Image (tube, grey):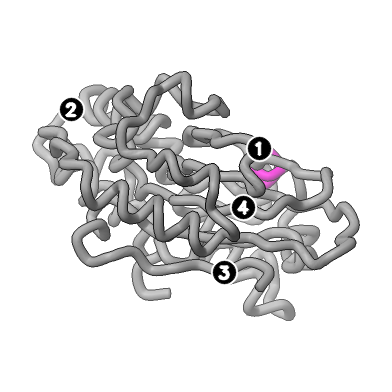
Amino acid sequence: MAYREIVPHPALREHVDRFWVDVPSPGALPQRRYVLPDGCSDVLVVLPLRAIHVVGTMTQALVLDEPPLATAAVRFRPGAAAAFLGVAAHELTDQSLAAEELRLPWLDPRLGDAPEPLAAVALLQRGLLRWQARQRPAQRLVAEVVRACFGAVLPTVQALARECGYSRQRLTRLVLEEVGIGAKDLVRVGRLQRAVVALQTTPGASLAHAALELGYFDQAHMCRDFRELVGLSPGLVRSSAHAIFPVRSLLAGT
């Protein structure tokens, strides 16, 4: 089965970007993988049940070198996890916690008996559908900000604040609380995700030209952003499509 994404039930799509499963081949060897920052929070179930982890929004890529494990997960949309996790997003930024620390009431106790990842996904979805999460007052506004940050035309924080009728500082605080990173960093993450898609799908394009097309000031700006967020140069990211996977479902028009 390898890696596979599952579109959530329509009633969950405002909150959940995708469910996903990852099933390694028998005898699979360790392979370095980079999990890019994407503004999302995930709940991961490792099977056979070893642990359930809650992973908050990341500010840098997570580098994985250990052998892959069979995993089922739910990936919440940026700004939508707090209604299900019971804490403000910034409290989980760059954190990985055992699920029991948060006492998530919608987690089905039968997850421990799930025979394989797709069965675990079904239980995750059923629990989320039954849980009547209260929509946080700012969730719709933050959802619009997230759509803009992952859209085809890169916004400035000042323009986003003006659209919302907020000051730049107030918008930054709001996005930090609901997404886990500030508005400026969310713009950077959205640009990074779109840039990785563009570099991987146009391997022969000039990096200097790509940088300008993607909203960077120049190639040096793009290289600096990639090194700070991924730890690799754009050229290495382009040639590492087997180990680096952008979250295409968040990118409007992709």
Q: Which mark is residue 71?
A: 4
Closer to viewer: mark 1 or mark 2: 1
The tag earlier along the polypeptide, 4 or 2, is 4
Q: Secondary structure at mark 3?
A: strand
Residue 50's disc is: 1
- Judged by depth in the image, the label closer to the viewer, 1 or 4, is 1
Residue 167 - label: 2
Amino acid on which disc 3 is placed? Arg
Q: Earlier in the sequence, mark 2 or mark 3?
A: 3
Q: Residue at x 83, y 49 (%)?
A: 67
* Whole-number angstrom distance, CA of label 4 to CA of label 2: 41 Å
In this rendering, position of residue 227 left or right of residue 129: right
Which residue appears at 50% of the width and 51% of the height?
73
Horizontally, residue 163 falls left or right of residue 147, namely: left
Give the vertical position of 16 relative to 162 (above or below): below
Amino acid type of the residue tagged 1 in the rendering:
Arg
Looking at the rendered structure, the secondary structure element under dot 4 is strand
Q: 236 or 221: nearer the eye?
A: 236
Q: Which residue is mark 3?
A: 4
Label at residue 21: none
User: Magenta span covers which residues?
Assistant: 225-230
Residue 126: say if magenta: no
- In which quarter of the view is residue 195 placed? bottom right
